[in-house]
Image (spheres, coloured by chain):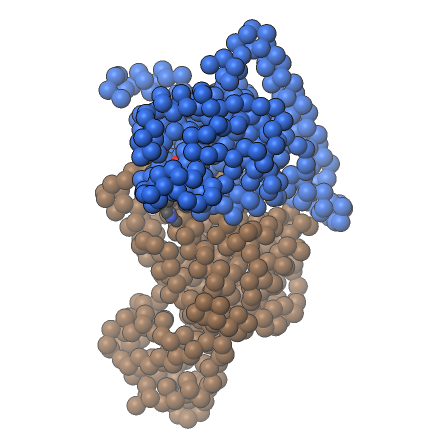
Amino acid sequence: MRKSAADPKGVLSGSHFLDGDHALAEGALAAGCRFFAGYPITPSTETAERFAERCPAVGGLFIQMEDEIASVAALIGAAWGGQKVMTVTSGPGFSLMMENIGLAVMTETPMVIANVQRAGPSTGLPTLPAQQDMMQVRWGSQGDYRVIALCPDSPQECFDLAVEAFNLSETYRVPTFIMTDETVGHMHEKVVIPPADQIGVVGRNWYQGPKADYRPYQFTGKDVAPMVKAGDGYRFHITGLTHDERGYPNLTVEQNEKVVTHLIEKIDSNADRIIRLDEDEIEGAEVVVISYGITSRIASRAVQLAREAGIKTGSLRLITIWPFAEKRIAELAGKIKGFVVPEINYGQMVREVERSAAGQCKVVGVGHCGGAVHDPEEILAAIQEAAK
Amino acid sequence: MNMNDQTFRVESPMAEFLRMERMPHIWCPGCGIGTVVNSFAEAVKKSNIDMDKLAVVSGIGCTGRVAGYVKLDSLHTTHGRAIPVATGLKLANPELKVVVVSGDGDLFGIGGNHFIHAARRNMDIVVICVNNFTYGMTGGQLTPTTPQTANASTTPYGNYEYPFSLPFLADACGATYVARWTSLHARNITKSIREAFNHKGFSFIEVIAPCTTLYQRRNRLGDGLDALNYYKEEAEVGQEIDTRDVGIDFQSEIRMGRFVKRDKPTYYEAVNERYANVLGDDYQLYGMSKPEREEKARREAEERIRMQALLEEEEARLLAEDIGTDEEGV
Ligand SMILES: Cc1ncc(C[n+]2csc(CCOP(=O)(O)OP(=O)(O)O)c2C)c(N)n1
Ligand code: SF4
Ligand SMILES: [Mg+2]
């Protein structure tokens, strides 16, 4: 998808001291997001607050909805009204969003949703970090589908990945998630926002042909149909029911196969283009630590300690969580003794690593109940075990 | 539809308004939803509004299928969520007229929270509820409007819950236009929809309509015609009725009419005013400058005055011709 320069109006170029939540809002504004619907929840509220403060001067609109169900519903309406749209939340709100995330998936509506994760289940530890919704983002709404999820490890990356999330979301017409956590969300660091002309933004792919020929969908499993917006005379229809290219319900198994395989394949067949990894000293490594988000910053300390102890340790940071980097991990599994997978949950992404490694090497998970980050020593112990 | 399909599709007076390629529709014979669609089409035609700028959003249910049949930008959403989708659509593209058409269960059961907040905000949308006192699509269960003692599949011994009176609820929540009719009063529905199109702010129109297959049958109330007879006997129009007095009991009198019409800034106007006051020229909603916003508001106000005059003129003509409105004529 072609990128063009960001609209300078939304870009706060310069060097700032921001927390991750605020950086998300700046990334959204830089990406051209002009509609934000949200409901307050710790530790994500600061993103909504920042957007609310910044948007009037940038030509955007913020609305505080009555709940998170309504927030995602409003995004769907606003996206088909022609806007780039975003919301943020945390665990309890994320659970409420699931139904309309499904509608967005089914109607192929672009939107960006950030989940600043806190520890659960339920209300759990509202002000403390976790990475416990990594599977919910993948499977949380009913039915079979794919989404894209990214995982920043710093406020700078919150900005960068917010822009990236909008670009992916527009390219594939799919809800795209930023799965950050309380620690990154509330951590203040330097964030450099480049000049607008150095920020590549994917605009909406507007349909240009004759009105009568417009079809909101194409089920190719590769590309998505261009979009139109309400009010431009296309008289489009969208529904959460299984539908044909015109968007009309077609409640047959045959049509469902077309729709569902398309929703899956448009992501899977483009996985190589979507997935971004950050690799360090993988070549010749005995053990590779796979981590993401805040945990990678703790893991890097453990990796350093392991290297000092003479274990050849590589690091692979998942910037893209979904689609999962299964090809790369399968490839490495044949060459190393083991993977170590620390995460602030009791074993979510480690299952994907096990599935991808398919028994070729050891896979050692390092779980955590949530509410804090790991002690690097625990990760070091796992590296030592994997290296045996 | 076994008469010549093709001819029907092209020549039907509704062809301009409906997605004829989607006919026949799913509704049962005698169902009241069709009347509402007809009145809506009539209102659109008479209002002369640009159909390209009119969007319909529905939730889930038999009534929720309306969005799929109208030849307009149309969104068939999730159960209860039509109003927040409409809110997003309207705010993203304020040029649009956005109409929600959905059922009593959808709008006031699962979606009740959205209704009360959209009314509170005076969101500039039109909400039309087909109130058939039941969950039609799922087989006749209890809804928040089912009258006490009425039989529903989940209250097989008769309903013991207190129902909502929808105009009262809408009024209390801040709706600035509230009306109720029955499906017998097609012309009144049309007129109300036209008024609502022309009204600035949250407009709510309740249409009492029969679910013949479930509510009527389960309560041994006969068919669609019997329902219309009930409306004819018991529905009464009144002037200046207090919405506190319009509750409906099982097969009781139905008080109808336009209950509320008041002027109050819409959500969008309130946003504009607030931001413009505080931020002055720095404020540019969707890139529109202050003079542009003011010019737009002026144009819209003029158009509303023109339309209201037309509506009233037409009403006077009807009365003069002694055709009368439905509640007088039928
Ligand atoms: C979240 C959710 N819960 C339940 C349903 C099942 N459901 C479909 S339609 C419906 C009731 C619709 O009733 P109403 O809004 O009164 O519409 P009607 O069919 O009477 O026109 C229900 C409960 C659903 N689709 N989604
Ligand atoms: S089930 Fe009831 S509401 Fe649904 S179409 Fe039939 S009569 Fe109408
Ligand atoms: Mg109903």
Residue B306 occupies quadrant: top right
Which hue belongs to chain B? blue
Q: Is residue B169 visible from the viewing direction of this image?
A: yes
Q: Is residue A253 above or below residue B46?
A: below
Foreground pick, A15 / A283: A15
Name the residue at 26% across, 42% down.
Answer: A255
Q: Is residue A167 above or below residue A225?
A: below
Q: Where does the image place residue A1, in percent across and percent down from the top left? A: 44, 50
Name the residue at 39% across, 84% down.
Answer: A313
Q: Is residue A114 visible from the viewing direction of this image?
A: no
- Seen in the image, is A24 located left or right of residue A174? right
Q: Is residue B57 above or below residue A15?
A: above
Q: Is residue A313 above or below residue B103?
A: below
Foreground pick, B220 / B290: B220
Name the residue at 39% across, 42% down.
Answer: B159
Q: Where does the image place residue A67, in percent across and percent down from the top left? A: 52, 54
Residue sitting at the far top: B321
- Seen in the image, is A89 located left or right of residue B63? right
Residue B30 occupies quadrant: top left
Q: Where does the image place residue B254, in percent across and percent down from the top left? A: 49, 28
Dividing the image into 4 quarters, which one contains the C terminus of chain A? bottom left
Q: Where does the image place residue B219, in percent across and percent down from the top left? A: 33, 33
Residue sitting at the far bottom: A309
Which hue belongs to chain A? brown
Foreground pick, B129 / B199: B129
Name the residue at 42% across, 66% down.
Answer: A133
The count of marks equals 0
